[in-house]
Amino acid sequence: MAPFVSIYQYTVEPEWDGKLLQDYFKESLGFSRRTIIDLKKGGLSVNGAHLRMVDPVHAGDQIQIVLGESEQINLIPNPELPVTLVYEDRDICVMEKPAGMSVHPCTLYYNDTVGNWFSARYRSEDGSSGIAFRPLYRLDRDTTGIVVAAKNTLAAGMLMGKLQKVYYAVAEGTIEQHEGCIDAPLVRVPGSIITRKVDFSNPQAQRAVTHFKVLCRANGHTLIACKLETGRTHQIRVHMAYIGHPLAGDTLYGGHDTQIRTQALHCKEVTIPAVKALSRAEMRIIRPLPRQMAELVGLQLDDCI
């Protein structure tokens, strides 16, 4: 058996008596077509026996799914990285990353990312296999805060795109309005592989919507909470620069790094929804602001939790 196993168990409700197993998975549990196809390959039993997807189920039937993770390690394991384990269970691993660390390896950063830390934590004793790294979203390299990864294909399929995140940011200057919505499309700057800009005239620009609320104003800075309708690259950073309030430390978009060396942006809160197929209740995870961000607006860390 694979060294990392997730077991899911369901009891068929009376209203599904006589319905096809595949319909129960799809309509009651919300399984995708891909997940149903994968289950045909093994790991599924009903009352301890094999059942085809086109066979009927009956009230009280006990369905069990066993997912074994034993994938070839394709990331360099690195347990020494300054990643904080916040929470873990059968479905997910919640981590907090510092500034200066990418979520996933690339050409420049191949052994010092969140993925490398994850691979070190979830590998077999002989180091040859382990859990594949499936982050449910990504943060910019210099953005701090919460990163959530799924620990198997079912959890990834059920949670991808469903998490609600709240980012805290410190913008330069005093934002007078108490809250606002920035609806401005973003496109890559010509000649750059990373920089984005607002462009209403370019048909290739993608719609981007950022909602923000002012939390406090102090020391020539404004602390805001942001929620995103869309998840474009550098969205908060570009939008705040667009309205004349770049993030402190964000020199790429007009901010200044005299008081903080990286953009003052932190994924502070993540809400993971209730999911019947995972037997999960809704949960909310919160991590306090980094000290440097708090100090920009004169807050003590205890005020930021």
Image (cartoon, grey):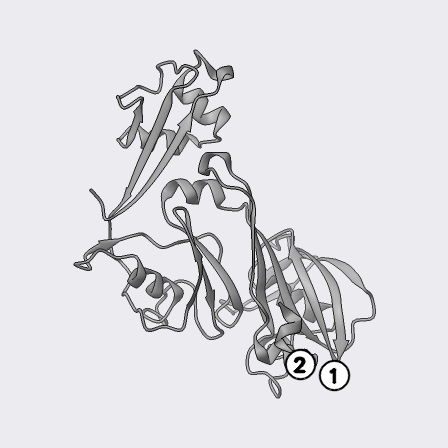
Residue 49's place in the image compared with 266, above or below, is: above
The type of residue carrying mark 1 is: Asn
Mark 1 or mark 2, which is nearer the start of the sequence?
1
Report if residue 254 is visible in the image: no
Q: Residue shown at 49%/31% (left/top)?
A: 30
Residue 301's place in the image compared with 45, above or below, is: below
Question: Would residue 92 be found to the left or right of residue 228 on screen?
Answer: left
Q: Secondary structure at mark 1?
A: loop
Residue 222's place in the image compared with 166, above or below, is: below
Q: Residue shown at 74%/83% (left/top)?
A: 219
Q: Which residue is mark 2?
A: 296
Q: Residues within 10 Å of mark 2 (few under 14, many from 20)?
A: many
Q: Image quadrant of residue 185?
A: bottom right
Residue 174's place in the image compared with 125, above or below, is: below
Q: Residue shown at 45%/22% (left/top)?
A: 24
Towards the viewer: 219 or 291: 291
Residue 177: percent from left, percent from top: 82, 66
Question: Would residue 207 be found to the left or right of residue 99 on screen?
Answer: right
Q: Residue shown at 51%/62% (left/top)?
A: 146
Q: Which residue is mark 1?
A: 219
Q: Secondary structure at mark 2?
A: helix
* Number of numbered discs visible in the structure rendering: 2
For the residues bearing labels 2 and 1, Cβ distance under 8 angstroms: yes
Residue 69: percent from left, percent from top: 28, 46
The outermost residue toward the bottom is: 258
The type of residue carrying mark 2 is: Leu
The outermost residue toward the top is: 18
